């Protein structure tokens, strides 16, 4: 544990970089994914297309994506963000459209009957009701991004993966393990936090209905 | 014959026995309907007969053999079993579903094939059309027909039926009840049928056992149950319109009084309830009842029908169908 | 990509063989562990809750972390790669085996028992066949995850197509890097499609779908 005691600040910096990668990746994914998800909910053809592309992309190893981006985007933070968004975007679009399409037609009918316009209905009724499914998508996204961001150190994007790779090249076992444990802890913590939010949203909806 | 002797079932952690020292005898070839409010122990009682539930105390004798001491798996192969959800095996064809027990018993394949086709015809399904299909292609009523064919395939002398019409839509239910009743009578099966529908109990049962809190409240032919409820609970259970239910059990032919009148002429196969409806609808007070050949066999008056419906007035020939 | 492969057929073939070999070994281990374990857990519900809790945590552990975390204990090479990939693929199949079996309609099981199927017959003739589509979906997920994560085995000396990427990076050999990346991407997609096709054929033959 001596490395950790002397270099905890380096671990914190790596953790902060990791969170930045995931945070920026998630923010961009949501900004693009939410509107596209609404479109997908209205157009089944587009939704099927998204499902196919996301299924295919999801099977491609993260390291391969990073490697393939190098000739076009080079190394560093922003190429890593491109890969993170590519993985996340499709999950978000898929879950937003699924969530919206699960809203009961009776409720939509009632809203329409009460005089809600399409935009009002979307923001006041549909999105709130779809929120548990959307949060479930965010949860999968974040856990995936924490994992992918670890590999991003391979293209010099920083983060906790950096500590792992340094440990490997320096043949320094403790550093490898600390990096691995830290990323695992981050993934498990994010998963648990988002799981609780999801559960609370579901429970609130179950109470209300 | 099925006989339960002082059978009890105590579930772990329950405050009182689900079935409490129950005695019940179902004569060979008869249908006994167990009925009562939820939690009365009717399903538990039935499921102890094929030992899907192990009794805590007492003896259960099926065809002369104490089943509480035999191997339950072998026992179940000798007892037909039909449930509300039908429980057809979705990954098997109708043929394989019907053949399930004969195959467990190791019948030769040729005999199994022949038997499966025979069973499907018996329950009114064209074998050529249905044998190779899968359950998901069948309607609810057709599935339950297959469920009964499967239960009958190994020719068990005894059948257990747990709400077999519960999941069937009301339009099909009546016809299915009639057909199954006819099959079970013809094959002389001894049947225990569980239901919560009093109309079904009266229609299907030679004997009806009304249960409450794990005990038998009344065990009688349906006519007696309607005519002479043992207590307020039974009276409530069979319903305020039990007089009408009772009339619907009586065939006009059987209760007509000698004579002939110029009034309405109605076939004797109608129930007394149908005759009452016709009289009320036509504003008459007497009808001539015709026999099978269309000859006058007697009359029924409003007053006579009213007398028949009065409770505590036993069936004219003193017995029920049992 | 094709040019680099044509120029270096030997390196490429060895990497591909290694990749397939590591993945196959890990998938075999996952099958050998998850199928019996999933079945056993359905018979021991008290243990199942705890086991599923552990598996759910395991499922969120990043693949790179899982591959390197045992480095000080197991060292580098083939075996540690297979062990890590086994752990990585295990959750998908274990969860699907367990839920597939527990989600078999209880009424169908009741009907089978009531007809006189013994406990063993209920398991082999009813529960397992009915759970098979869900179990197979788990096999497919595990296989794709393993083939994909096996790319990272290059970091702990396990070889495979990932090695083309890492050594391509280290030696600024970009044709090799791109060849490795494309090959592994295509391999993962091919495995996904192959298992999807197999799944489709299989569920059709069980009669559960048209």
Image: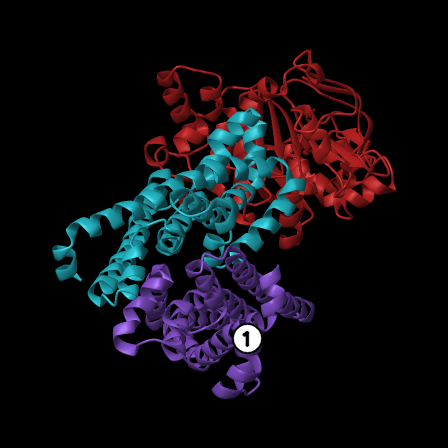
Chain letter tied to purple? A
Number of numbered discs visible in the structure rendering = 1
Q: Is residue B71 above or below residue A201?
A: above
Q: Is residue C135 above or below residue B210?
A: below
- Residue at 26 percent of width and 64 percent of height: C171
Which chain is disc 1 placed on? Answer: A
Q: Nearer the viewer, residue B197 or C115?
A: C115
Residue C13 drawn at (x, y percent): 21, 48
Chain letter tied to cyan? C
Residue A58 drawn at (x, y percent): 37, 62
Q: Is residue A41 above or below residue B174?
A: below
Report the residue that reaches farthest toward the top: B64
Q: Is residue C7 above or below residue B153?
A: below
Q: Which residue is mark 1?
A: A13
Q: Quadrant of the N terminus of chain C?
A: bottom left
Residue C132 drawn at (x, y percent): 43, 40
Q: Is residue A123 left or right of residue A97?
A: right
Q: Nearer the viewer, residue C108 or A52?
A: A52
Chain B drawn in what color? Answer: red
Under tag 1, what secondary structure?
Answer: helix
Q: Nearer the viewer, residue A102 or B138?
A: A102
- Residue at 72 percent of width and 39 percent of height: B246
Residue A117 drawn at (x, y percent): 50, 88
């Amino acid at each position: 544990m001596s490395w950790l005691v002397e270099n905890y600040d380096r671990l914190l910096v790596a953790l902060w970089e990791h969170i930045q990668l995931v945070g920026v990746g998630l923010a961009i994914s949501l900004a693009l994914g939410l509107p596209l998800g609404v479109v997908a909910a209205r157009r089944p053809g587009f939704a099927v297309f998204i499902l196919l592309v996301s299924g295919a992309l999801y099977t491609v190893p993260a390291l391969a994506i990073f490697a393939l981006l190098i000739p076009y985007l080079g190394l560093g933070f922003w190429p890593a963000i491109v890969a993170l968004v590519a993985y996340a975007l499709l999950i978000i679009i898929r879950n937003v459209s699924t969530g919206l399409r699960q809203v009961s037609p009776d409720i939509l009918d009632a809203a329409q009957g009460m005089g809600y316009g399409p935009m009002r209905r979307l923001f006041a009724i549909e999105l709130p009701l779809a929120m548990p499914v959307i949060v479930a998508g965010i949860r999968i996204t974040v856990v995936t991004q924490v994992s992918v961001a670890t590999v991003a150190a391979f293209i010099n994007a920083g983060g906790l993966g950096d500590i792992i790779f340094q440990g490997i090249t320096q043949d320094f076992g403790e550093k490898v393990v600390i990096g691995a444990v830290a990323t695992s802890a981050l993934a498990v913590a994010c998963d648990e936090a988002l799981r609780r939010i999801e559960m609370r949203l579901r429970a609130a909806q179950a109470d209300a209905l | 014959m099925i006989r339960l002797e002082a059978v009890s079932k105590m579930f772990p952690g329950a405050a009182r026995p689900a079935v409490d020292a129950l005695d019940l005898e179902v004569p060979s070839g008869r249908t006994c309907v167990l009925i009562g409010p939820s939690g009365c122990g009717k399903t538990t009682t039935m499921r102890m007969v094929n030992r899907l539930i192990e009794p805590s105390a007492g003896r259960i004798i099926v065809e002369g053999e104490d089943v509480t001491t035999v191997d339950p798996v072998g026992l179940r192969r000798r007892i037909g079993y039909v449930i509300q959800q039908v429980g057809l095996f979705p990954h098997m064809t109708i043929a394989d579903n019907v053949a399930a027990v004969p195959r467990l018993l190791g019948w030769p394949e040729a005999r199994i094939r022949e038997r499966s086709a025979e069973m499907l015809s018996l329950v009114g399904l064209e074998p050529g059309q249905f044998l190779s299909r899968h359950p998901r292609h069948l309607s609810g009523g057709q599935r339950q027909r297959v469920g009964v064919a499967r239960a009958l395939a190994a020719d068990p002398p005894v059948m257990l039926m747990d709400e077999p019409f519960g999941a069937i839509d009301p339009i099909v239910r009546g016809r299915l009840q009639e057909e199954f009743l006819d099959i079970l009578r013809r094959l002389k099966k001894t049947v225990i049928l569980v239901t919560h529908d009093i109309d079904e109990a009266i229609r299907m049962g030679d004997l009806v056992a009304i249960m409450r809190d794990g005990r038998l409240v009344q065990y009688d032919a349906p006519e007696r149950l309607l005519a002479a409820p043992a207590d307020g609970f039974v009276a409530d259970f069979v319903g305020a319109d039990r007089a009408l239910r009772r009339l619907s059990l009586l065939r006009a032919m059987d209760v007509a009084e000698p004579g002939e009148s110029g009034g309405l002429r109605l076939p004797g196969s109608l129930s007394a309830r149908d005759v009452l409806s016709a009289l009320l609808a036509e504003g008459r007070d007497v009808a001539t009842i015709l026999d099978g050949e269309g000859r006058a066999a007697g009359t029924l008056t409003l007053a006579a029908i009213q007398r028949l419906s009065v409770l505590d007035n036993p069936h004219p020939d003193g017995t029920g169908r049992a | 990509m094709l040019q680099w492969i044509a120029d270096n057929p030997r390196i490429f073939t060895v990497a591909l063989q290694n990749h397939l070999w590591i993945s196959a070994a890990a998938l075999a281990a996952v099958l050998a562990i998850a199928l019996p374990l999933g079945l056993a857990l359905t018979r021991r519900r008290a243990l199942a809750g705890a086991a599923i809790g552990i598996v759910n945590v395991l499922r969120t552990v990043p693949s790179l972390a899982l591959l390197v975390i045992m480095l000080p204990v197991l060292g580098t090479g083939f075996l540690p790669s297979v062990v890590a990939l086994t752990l990585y693929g295990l959750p998908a199949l274990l969860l699907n085996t367990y839920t597939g079996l527990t989600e078999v309609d209880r009424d169908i099981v009741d009907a089978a028992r009531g007809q006189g199927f013994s406990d063993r017959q209920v398991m082999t003739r009813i529960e397992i066949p009915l759970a098979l589509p869900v179990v197979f979906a788990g096999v497919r997920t595990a296989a794709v995850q393993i083939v994909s994560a096996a790319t990272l085995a290059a970091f702990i000396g396990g070889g495979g197509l990932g090695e083309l990427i890492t050594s391509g990076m280290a030696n600024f050999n970009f044709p090799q890097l791109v060849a490795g990346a494309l090959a592994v991407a295509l391999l993962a997609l091919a495995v996904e499609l192959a298992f999807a096709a197999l799944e489709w054929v299989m569920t059709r033959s069980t009669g559960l779908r048209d």
